[in-house]
Image: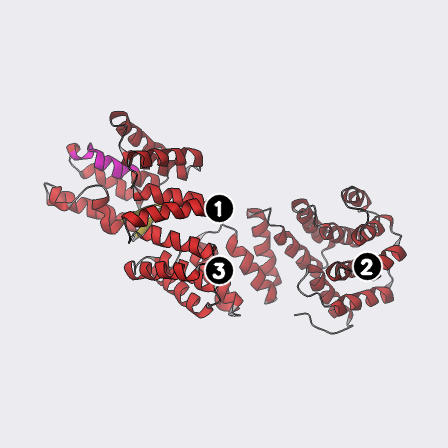
């Protein structure tokens, strides 16, 4: 079994060697009851019942409670419980008497990780390595820090040092394999992961990482099998649930995907990732209310994910909630101010929600940030001035960038639609469809408008 402390994957205790980590062995204990107490501690840790585990230490003889190995054990569990202040108090007391106690330094490093004090954590880990160059847990933690910082070569070096000392170290096998995946060396990654899943059959992470590897190389069936195995071992592992759900969605098993994504949301309702995929699936399955709910939560959890605001805008346009759609596109534009189509979408909905002149001040601000010699600028100016459509139309006709031509054709259609020029609007809606630039927000909205008007090829799903 593997216990992770507050989501920090590198801060872990392998309970199968729980006594050995701390230099404890049943033969060192004077009474069988003391061994039984620590066995019960381990049982509580498997269930993440940290308070109950800590209470059991009071049943140990006082002379044992005061030994460093027991105090380190308590402090480690306190970190797992989020009681970092108590853990640091114990560790600092040990270090005051023994400045070279690396176990106590690791407790402080773990506490720093939980408190998001990465600079302090790194300094403590460096101190451990200076004292014990082959301290595998410190080396693994330093490797994971460097992966987070995108320093893959440095991270690989740390993992290699671990594997030189402990060739079967699970953390290093999986971590090094993940770097091989990033650097597109799948055979080397697979070799390490095959070893890891053989050695650690009851640990979800090697199966999860191998599933990610297979997914990245297009071996979807193998990836699905590994994700499924990982969930058999650890049914509530958030990242496995999300990765499994995403891949099921990609292979068109949407209902099954939604089941696992919904479970991920139940497990971790305040993490944004699962909402991205659950909302997209609900949208595609025409559960628009469910999709809007998920996108609304998504943008609250991660406001810089502007695609969430974009999706909300489309859903609200579908329901002709023009003001609400405007607000969604304004939020998207705030997060991505160089994506000028969001400004046009906001203006379009603003005009539909009230007067055609309502977005004028906003558009004036946008225009000041745009390059003037572009088709996009001419279209934006047209929305601002409520004139100049002949110039914009000419520029659209002569636009060489097919993507930009299609995009601006849609906004010309919408402009004429708002102005009441139905025949001209229809012409531009059909022109946009004929350009066949599929997959953009403009394509999606254009198909919605064509279906509503009963013109053109009905391709909207």
Query: Can residue 145 be seen here?
Result: yes
Q: Where residue 98 sits: x, y (%)?
A: 25, 28
Q: Where residue 275 sits: x, y (%)?
A: 54, 56
In the image, taking residue 425 as reference, residue 71 lies left or right, namely left
Q: Which residues are magenta?
A: 64-75
Does the segment drawn in magenta span residue 47?
Answer: no
Residue found at x 74% / y 74%: 457
Residue found at x 47% / y 64%: 215
**In the picture, residue 131 is in which quadrant?**
top left
- The residues tagged by marks 1 and 2 sit, at their Cα atoms, a distance apart of 43 Å
Q: Which residue is mark 2?
A: 412
Q: Where residue 376 sits: x, y (%)?
A: 78, 53
Q: Which residue is mark 1?
A: 150
Residues tagged 1 and 2 counted as in contact (Cβ below 8 A): no
Q: Which residue is mark 3?
A: 261
Residue found at x 20% / y 48%: 39
Which element is circle 1 on?
loop
In the image, taking residue 95 as reference, residue 325 lies left or right, namely right
Q: Is residue 421 above or below residue 383?
A: below
Query: Can residue 417 be seen here?
Result: no
**In the picture, residue 62 is in which quadrant?**
top left
**Which is more N-terminal, label 2 or label 3?**
3
């Amino acid at each position: 079994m593997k216990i992770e402390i507050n989501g920090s994957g590198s801060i872990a205790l392998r309970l199968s060697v729980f006594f050995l980590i701390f230099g404890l062995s049943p033969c060192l204990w004077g009474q069988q009851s003391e061994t039984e107490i620590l066995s019960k501690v381990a049982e509580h840790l498997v269930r993440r019942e940290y308070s109950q585990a800590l209470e059991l230490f009071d049943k140990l003889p006082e002379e044992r409670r005061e030994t460093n190995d027991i105090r380190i054990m308590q402090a480690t569990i306190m970190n797992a419980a989020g009681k970092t202040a108590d853990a640091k108090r114990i560790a600092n007391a040990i270090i005051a008497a023994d400045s070279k106690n690396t176990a106590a330094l690791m407790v402080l490093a773990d506490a720093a990780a939980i408190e998001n004090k990465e600079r302090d954590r790194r300094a403590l880990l460096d101190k451990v390595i200076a004292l014990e160059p082959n301290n595998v847990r410190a080396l693994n933690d330093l490797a994971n820090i460097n992966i987070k910082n995108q320093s893959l070569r440095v991270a690989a070096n740390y993992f290699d040092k671990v594997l030189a000392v402990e060739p079967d170290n699970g953390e290093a096998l999986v971590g090094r394999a993940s770097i091989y995946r990033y650097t597109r060396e799948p055979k080397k990654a697979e070799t390490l992961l095959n070893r890891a899943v053989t050695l650690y059959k009851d640990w979800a992470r090697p199966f999860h990482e191998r599933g990610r590897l297979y997914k990245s190389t297009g071996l979807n069936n193998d990836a699905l099998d590994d994700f499924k195995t990982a969930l058999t071992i650890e049914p509530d592992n958030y990242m496995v649930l999300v990765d499994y759900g995403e891949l099921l969605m990609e292979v068109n098993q949407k209902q099954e995907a939604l089941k696992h994504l919904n479970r991920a949301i139940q497990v971790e309702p305040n993490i944004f990732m699962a909402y991205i995929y659950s909302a997209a699936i609900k949208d595609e399955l025409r559960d628009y209310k469910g999709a809007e709910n998920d996108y609304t939560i998504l943008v609250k959890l991660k406001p810089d994910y502007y695609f969430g605001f974009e999706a909300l805008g489309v859903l609200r346009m579908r329901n002709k909630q023009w003001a609400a759609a405007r607000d969604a596109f304004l939020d998207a534009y705030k997060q991505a101010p160089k994506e000028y189509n969001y400004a046009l979408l906001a203006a379009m909905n603003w005009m539909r929600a009230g007067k055609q002149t309502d977005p004028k001040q906003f558009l004036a601000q946008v225009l000041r940030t745009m390059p003037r010699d572009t088709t996009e600028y001419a279209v934006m100016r047209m929305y601002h001035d409520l004139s100049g459509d002949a110039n914009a139309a000419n520029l659209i006709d002569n636009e060489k960038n097919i993507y930009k031509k299609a995009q601006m054709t849609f906004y010309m259609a919408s402009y004429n639609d708002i102005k009441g020029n139905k025949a001209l609007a229809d012409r531009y809606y059909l022109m946009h469809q004929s350009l066949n630039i599929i997959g953009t927000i403009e394509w999606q909205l254009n198909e919605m408008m064509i279906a509503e008007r009963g013109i053109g090829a009905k391709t909207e799903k």
